[in-house]
């Protein structure tokens, strides 16, 4: 039917002068875009099937391929853009919810871009991090409100001892951790890459809700193990093997929405890890059916703390929503050792497009209001705050820390380091880069040795950049920047936005 | 046969330039770029476009791609310590290079009896039907720092080991 026809999203240009007909593109494309006609000795491409992952472009030995966006456009219209028309056309064909992957791509105000950093000039010296020590070490966990000590008198001498005991902490060499990505949503090689990088760098990775695969047990001491609404793979060994336990309430890309891993992805290995029958759909309910209030959450937090004998931090991850400050206050009072907040730009393997693009609040605002609220209530020390959702560079990280976060989670950035080109087709399970797939033809494309090296390099590069920026501000420890909003100024934000962020406009002095 | 070749083995081992290619089938993505780069490396111009599209004769690949379902790997001559192909070669077209210790192939001496193909337990030599000779086989790209297949494998499925079995890395790895 002619009405159902959509033009292709991409143009595939093949330089006939350069193409040597080696057919590498034909062999590697999971979407069967390229084909070879032996009779005519020609390689041809069908752009309608192309998802724009650029794998063929990168693998082509002569650089003969170029994938670009098809700029063929409908008549310009401020209300009815090409994307809108395309979405409606697709829904008219299928009658279903539009699905997508990765973080939101709509043009929301980028607050990080409107925040600028300070630097030391004359009145305080800047520091050269190459010559002087610079501390990025970060501790995640509940800190005591006061330090108490006592003393004994033995042999006429006072012997002091500490009465206060420190709750369990995670020690990070850099305030960057890898975000929760479950085995199932991503391949084992992806998890192995980031787990190894986290272990080597001295930070943490997160199992996501899919359990801890047997193969990744060697990296379990650097893993935050997640307990989500589906409770996949949760048993006492799982809780005890991780470095911390995280209760997942929500996710920035789809607040209020559960998860659904289709049965065809539940292979033997995933079924063993998730502890569900092979080939069955793995459904994560939208809510935890045992948590309908802060009091219920407290019960689960303490049940988990009891299970791990109070030796590991127990945190809670929520999506940033309108009432985030009050919710986090409740979570901290419920006994969480840390709270992870995921903003509207957070990534996902699959989410309804309409939810991803319209539900939640930007992480910048959420960190600022949460930090402010916890300080006002005098409970900021009781829990660490981890920010997540669309961190793209070290500058975003340092701004989030200055706004009040203790550390950040990176997910999409880590996947980009592993090869992801953000084609947003994670939900199809045909990831050419071997990341969001369980297809044995595709998962092997991510060599975890290469992946671990690249993820490690990303952590290192961002850490070095953070040190440079800290040095420029004349600060020699990330601790001194945490919640230090005087180091931030706004450019082009109105009064209300600055009030929420708690920062002055550029040009205002201290 | 034992005596002569045994001696040869001993001398060659002493001078052996020790490099071994190792295939890791779990990382092979089946792109067959190893073949493309092998052909390019052994072409006259060593330029991929000229080798494939120019007028110069295109050499045979010395690396053979095998696949079955998702499992694939690229096979090349293992340069055995005790090479059956060399023992069965009538003319000395296959010989042990004294300097490098590798099993090399001189196409000019080959008479096309294909006994090497018959005797190779790995199938690492294939017939060249066009010229009625044995096809080209891996020479480990001895002039190059890294064999072309190792240097260009996009997923590091083909790696090079040194004499101690340690992986040799390129500078940018």
Image (tube, rainbow, N blue to C red):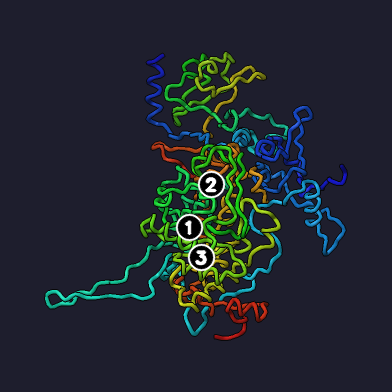
Mark 2 crowd level (few <14, some 14–19, many ≥20, 10 Å Cα):
many
User: What's the mark number on residue A334?
Assistant: none
Disc 1 + disc 2, Cβ < 8 Å: no
Observer-nearest of A462 and A501: A501
* Mark 1 vs mark 2, CA separation in Å: 16 Å
Kindly identify which residue carries mark 2: A183
Going from the N terminus, do you reach mark 1 or mark 2 first? Answer: 2
Marks 2 and 3 share the same chain: yes
Labelled pair 2, 3 in contact (Cβ < 8 Å): no
Query: Residue A440 location in percent, x, y?
Result: 58, 37
Say which label, 2 or 3, has the lower sequence index: 2
Q: Secondary structure at mark 3?
A: helix
The subunit letter for the residue under badge 2 reads: A
Mark 3–mark 1 distance (CA, rounded to whole Å): 16 Å
In the image, residue A303 lies at what x, y percent? 42, 57
Nearest to viewer (mark 3 / mark 1): 3
**Does A183 sit left or right of B161 as displayed?**
right
What label sits on residue A246 in the rendered view? 1
Question: Marks 2 and 3, how far apart in space?
Answer: 29 Å
Above or below: residue A283 compared with residue A142: above
Which quarter of the rendered picture does the N terminus of chain A lie within? top right
- In this figure, which residue is indicated by the disc labeled 3? A294
Front residue of this view, candidates A203 and A127: A203
């Amino acid at each position: 039917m002619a009405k159902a026809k959509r033009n292709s999203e991409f143009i595939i240009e093949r330089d006939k002068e350069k193409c040597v007909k080696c057919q590498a593109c034909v062999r590697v494309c999971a979407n069967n875009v390229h084909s070879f006609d032996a009779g005519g000795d020609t390689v041809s491409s069908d752009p309608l099937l192309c998802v724009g992952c650029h794998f063929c472009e990168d693998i082509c030995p002569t650089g003969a391929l170029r994938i670009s966006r098809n700029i063929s456009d409908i008549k310009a219209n401020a209300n009815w853009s090409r994307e809108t028309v395309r979405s409606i056309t697709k829904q008219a064909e299928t009658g279903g919810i539009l699905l997508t992957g990765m973080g939101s791509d709509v043009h929301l105000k980028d607050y990080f871009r409107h925040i600028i950093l300070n630097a030391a000039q004359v009145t305080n010296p800047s520091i050269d991090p190459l010559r002087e020590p610079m501390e990025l070490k970060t501790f995640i966990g509940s800190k005591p409100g006061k330090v108490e000590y006592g003393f004994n008198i033995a042999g006429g001498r006072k012997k002091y001892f500490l009465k206060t005991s420190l709750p369990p902490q995670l020690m990070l060499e850099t305030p960057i951790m890898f975000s929760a990505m479950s085995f199932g949503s991503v391949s084992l090689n992806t998890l192995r890459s980031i787990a190894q990088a986290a272990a080597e760098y001295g930070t943490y990775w997160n199992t996501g809700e899919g359990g801890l695969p047997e193969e990744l047990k060697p990296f379990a001491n650097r893993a935050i193990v997640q307990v989500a609404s589906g409770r996949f793979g949760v048993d006492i060994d799982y809780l005890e093997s991780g470095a911390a336990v995280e209760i997942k309430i929500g996710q920035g890309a789809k607040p209020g929405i559960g998860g659904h891993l289709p049965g065809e992805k539940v292979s033997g290995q995933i079924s063993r890890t998730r502890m569900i029958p092979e080939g069955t759909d793995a459904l994560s309910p939208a809510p935890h059916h045992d948590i309908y209030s802060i009091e219920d959450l407290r019960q689960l937090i303490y049940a988990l703390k009891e299970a791990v004998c109070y030796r590991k931090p127990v945190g809670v991850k929520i999506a940033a929503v309108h009432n985030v400050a009050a919710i986090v206050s409740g979570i901290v009072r419920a006994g969480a050792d840390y709270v992870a907040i995921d903003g509207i730009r957070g990534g996902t393997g699959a989410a309804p497009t309409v939810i991803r693009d319209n539900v939640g609040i930007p992480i910048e605002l959420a960190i600022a209001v949460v930090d402010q609220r916890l300080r006002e209530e005098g409970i900021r020390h009781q829990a660490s705050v981890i920010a997540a959702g669309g961190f793209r560079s070290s500058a975003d990280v340092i701004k989030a820390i200055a706004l009040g976060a203790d550390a950040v989670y990176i997910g999409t950035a880590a996947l980009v380091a592993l090869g992801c080109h953000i084609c947003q087709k994670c939900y199809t399970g045909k990831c050419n880069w071997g990341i969001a797939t369980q297809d044995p033809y595709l998962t092997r494309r991510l060599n975890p040795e290469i992946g671990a090296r690249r993820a490690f390099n990303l952590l290192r590069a961002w850490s070095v950049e953070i040190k440079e920026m800290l040095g420029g501000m004349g600060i020699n420890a990330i601790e001194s920047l945490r919640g230090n909003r005087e180091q931030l100024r706004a450019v082009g934000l109105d009064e209300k936005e600055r009030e929420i962020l708690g920062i002055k406009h550029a040009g205002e002095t201290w | 046969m034992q005596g002569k070749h045994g001696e040869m083995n001993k001398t060659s081992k002493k001078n052996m330039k020790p490099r071994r290619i190792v295939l890791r089938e779990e990382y092979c993505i089946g792109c067959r770029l190893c073949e493309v780069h092998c052909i390019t490396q052994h072409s006259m111009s060593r330029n991929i476009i000229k080798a494939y599209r120019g007028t110069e004769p295109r050499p045979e690949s010395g690396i053979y791609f095998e696949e079955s379902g998702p499992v694939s790997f690229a096979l090349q001559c293992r340069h055995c310590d005790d090479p059956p192909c060399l023992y069965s070669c009538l003319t000395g077209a296959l010989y042990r290079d004294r300097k490098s210790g590798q099993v090399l192939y001189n196409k000019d001496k080959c008479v096309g009896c294909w006994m090497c193909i018959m005797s190779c337990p790995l199938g690492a030599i294939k017939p060249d039907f066009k010229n009625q000779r044995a096809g080209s086989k891996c020479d480990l790209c001895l002039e190059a720092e890294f064999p072309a297949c190792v240097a260009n494998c996009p997923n590091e499925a083909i790696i090079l080991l040194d004499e101690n079995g340690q992986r040799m890395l390129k500078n940018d790895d």
